[in-house]
Image: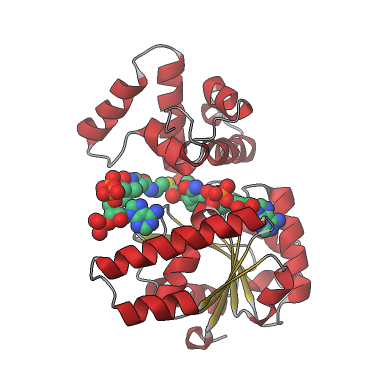
Amino acid sequence: MASAAVEVIGVVGGGQMGSGIAQLAAVAGFDVWLHDTEPSALQRAQKSIVDSIRRLVSKGQISQFAGTSSLNRLRYTSNLEDLRTSDVIIEAIVESEVVKKKLFSELDKIVKESTILASNTSSISITRLASSTSRPSKVVGMHFMNPPPIMKLVEIVRGADTSDEVFMTIKTLAERLGKTVICSQDFPGFIVNRILMPMINEAFYALYTGVATKEDIDTGMKLGTNHPMGPLRLADFIGLDVCLSILKVLYEGLGDSKYSPCPLLVRYVDAGRLGRKRGIGVYNYQ
Ligand code: CAA
Ligand code: NAD
């Protein structure tokens, strides 16, 4: 499919990433379907998108007309079949290979033959996700950074069978969304999380072994290396469940103990302390 032919985008998963991607695509002029299995997640997504677009209008970053048209281009649904007319689907559900494969196999049966299935996975093999479909050449990684409307990068991941045409369509789409593109081969964690997650894990080990307080670890990295937020606060921002899932993929996929998730991170996730989205993680946001 020529990139110019992309008109309708389906986003699956209306959590922090999916809602941000849907907003970005609608503001860029695409018709967007946003699907989540949880009606409450769809309601939260809609509220966050409406608030965010209103802020863009009130700050003068887009016109009132553009804001209203963007909101009108967005449709919310708990019925996956509504996404059947999409030219590109961007999947942003839970970071689990089993759950993602099940979804890819369902989508494969629902959408048009020409539809590209892109995954926003942080770490999972695109080649293996593609193997659950009948269209491996049309499966690709399209990894946005959090928050998607703000962060300038999209990491495109080529599976073993991703075609050049699909890669170019997704690259052009990312550029139409205002992003700079990097390309990664299909290795666990790709480029960004291969490097970011060991730093976050090390910050947990520093806290776990009593090197310093959480505040001093974060201030050290924020002011000492000019990061916008310290690694523990960033882990809360990403979601501790997401960080743990990524570290497990790195550990299992690369077979090196340096990726072994810190027991403190595991304990927080076991306790339901998933970070900012749950109101508590390393820090308390309530
Ligand atoms: N959606 C839309 N806009 C948002 C937003 C969101 N979720 N969050 C913040 N913004 C906007 C604000 O409206 C504000 O806009 P203006 O400057 O026009 O007023 C701007 O971003 C700055 O926000 P704040 O003043 O509230 O806060 P801040 O200056 O601390 O910036 C931040 C917030 C952009 C998140 C910044 O702290 C930051 O860059 N943090 C690091 C983020 C990061 O590293 N992300 C990558 C994580 S790794 C990843 O995503 C990959 C993975 O697979 C895990
Ligand atoms: P989240 O927990 O905020 O949202 C996930 C959403 O998916 C939830 O609303 C859930 O109801 C929905 N969902 C789960 N299973 C579903 C299914 N089968 N069908 C439809 N909806 C389903 O998660 P998130 O942080 O938005 O992460 C989503 C994806 O994006 C993950 O693959 C994650 O690794 C990746 N990612 C996350 C970040 C981050 O910083 N959080 C950054 C880049 C990529």
Task: Give the camera-side residue of 209 and 126.
Answer: 209
Residue 133: % across, % down: 75, 67
Residue 79: % across, % down: 72, 68
Please state, as top left, top right, bottom left or bottom right, where the C terminus lies in the image: top left
Going 39% across and 38% down the picture, which residue do you hit? 234
| Left or right of 42, for residue 153 | left
Against 238, residue 259 (above or below) is above
| Quadrant assignment, res 52 | bottom left
- Residue 142 visible, this angle: yes
Task: Give the camera-side residue of 156 and 63.
Answer: 63
Residue 172: % across, % down: 43, 77
| Quadrant assignment, res 101 | bottom right
Going 58% across and 22% down the picture, which residue do you hit? 267
Going 62% across and 58% down the picture, which residue do you hit? 126
- Residue 156 visible, this angle: no
Going 59% across and 26% down the picture, which residue do you hit? 266
Please state, as top left, top right, bottom left or bottom right, where the N terminus lies in the image: bottom right
Looking at this rendering, what residue extends furthest in the top direction? 210
Residue 73: % across, % down: 50, 79
Q: How many numbered marks have been drawn onto this rendered protein structure?
A: 0
Task: Give the camera-side residue of 212 and 180.
Answer: 212
Against 7, residue 161 (above or below) is above
Against 217, residue 131 (above or below) is below
